[in-house]
């Protein structure tokens, strides 16, 4: 975990879900505050048109936008943050999400906290943590046909609705099981609260280094979610001669078609995604807040001590 950058020549990249009217409004307000504080604001080319912000900002094509930016402020939901991660991962630029979506598990702040969030960005009062990613390689008949990466998860899904996807899953070069299923989720701890969670996987604290394997509706006696070493290599092969092929999704955004016989290997990513944090609250508190978990009646160790229990 590292401290923020110095104040000299500061540039902040904004990534905005411009399809939301409130996101456009928030982005304009954030831009004004940053410029008034002598911080350069950088926008993506297409988004600058949607935002209607004039010549006071820098406009960059997507591929170059993160380079030289101190931080990327993402205004939207988790989908917008995942899109921003595609822009910032190679540059190592940290992301700070302002949630305008639903759960917003990757976001650090809510719209109600906008003023204090911008104050913290202006003051450089944030820390940066690294989140594990996964690298993915797809091969067919021994030849690599695609590669990718994901922050949350790489998911194999069946391409057709009528039949099950037939796969053999392996861990560390050893076969584990054959499943007829709707798919398989390979997730990071960060992604344990995303698709893997919906598929029945465990919640894993983000500081835990591990790889998750979660079957989706597998027709098998043994089809439990599993947590493997971060140094393991997880793989799934679409059985040769299968009646239905598959589709690989990385973070629900990037796809690769998987023909019969295709093999997907997943391992710890070589490059993490960096997230900016304003608060050092326990992950338990984030779970309770995001999922609105019932905790009424909790007394806690401190309260028990005060009462002499």
Image (cartoon, grey):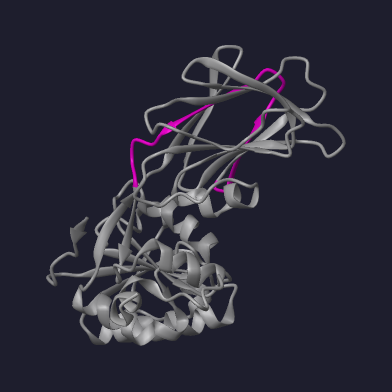
Q: Which range of residues does the magenta coloring cover?
A: 251-272
Q: Residue at x 64, y 52 (%)?
A: 198
- 61 sits left or right of 146 in the view: left
Residue occupying image coordinates x 28% and y 56%: 129
Q: Is residue 216 visible?
A: yes
Horizontally, residue 168 falls left or right of residue 308, namely right
Front position in the image: 20 or 299: 299
Instruction: Measuring from the top left, give residue 260's x and y in whole percent.
Output: 72, 20
The image quarter in which residue 22 lies: bottom right
In magenta stretch: residue 308: no
Q: Give the residue furthest to the right.
A: 162
User: Where the C terminus falls, by quadrant?
Assistant: bottom left
The question of residue 258 being in magenta is answered with yes
The one of 13 and 229 positioned closer to us in this rendering:
229
Which image quarter: residue 70?
bottom left
- The structure residue drawn at horizontal position 45% and vertical position 51%, both measured from the top left corner, is 190
**Picture layout, residue 96 above or below residue 246:** below
Q: Is residue 225 above or below residue 55?
A: above
Residue sitting at x 46%, y 19%: 172
Q: Position of residue 98 (x, y in %)?
A: 43, 73
Name, please, the residue furthest toward the front: 309
């Amino acid at each position: 975990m590292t401290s923020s950058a110095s104040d000299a020549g500061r540039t902040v990249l904004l990534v905005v879900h411009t399809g939301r009217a409130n996101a456009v409004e928030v982005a304009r307000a954030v831009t004004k505050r940053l410029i008034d504080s002598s911080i350069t604001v950088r926008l993506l080319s297409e988004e600058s048109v949607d935002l209607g912000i004039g010549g006071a900002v820098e406009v960059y094509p997507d591929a170059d936008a993160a380079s030289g930016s101190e931080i990327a402020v993402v205004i939207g939901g988790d989908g917008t943050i995942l899109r921003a991660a595609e822009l910032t991962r190679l540059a190592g630029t940290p992301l700070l999400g302002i949630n305008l979506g639903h759960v917003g598990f990757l976001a650090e702040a809510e719209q109600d906290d906008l003023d204090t969030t911008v104050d913290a960005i202006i003051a450089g009062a944030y820390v940066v943590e690294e989140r594990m990613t996964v690298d993915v390689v797809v091969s067919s008949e021994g030849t690599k046909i695609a590669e990718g990466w994901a922050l949350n998860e790489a998911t194999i899904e069946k391409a057709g609705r009528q039949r099950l996807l037939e796969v053999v899953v392996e861990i560390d070069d050893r076969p584990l099981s054959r499943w007829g299923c709707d798919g398989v989720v390979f997730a990071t701890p960060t992604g344990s609260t995303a698709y893997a969670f919906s598929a029945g996987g465990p919640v894993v604290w983000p500081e835990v280094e591990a790889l998750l394997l979660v079957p989706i509706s597998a027709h098998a006696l043994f089809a439990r979610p599993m947590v493997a070493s971060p140094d393991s290599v997880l793989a799934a092969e679409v059985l040769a001669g299968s009646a239905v092929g598959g589709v690989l999704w990385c973070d629900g955004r990037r796809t690769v078609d998987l023909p019969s016989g295709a093999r997907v290997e997943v391992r710890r990513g070589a490059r993490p995604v960096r997230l900016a944090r304003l608060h050092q609250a326990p992950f338990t508190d984030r779970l309770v807040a995001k999922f609105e978990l019932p905790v009424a009646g909790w007394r806690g160790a401190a309260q028990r001590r005060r009462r002499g229990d």
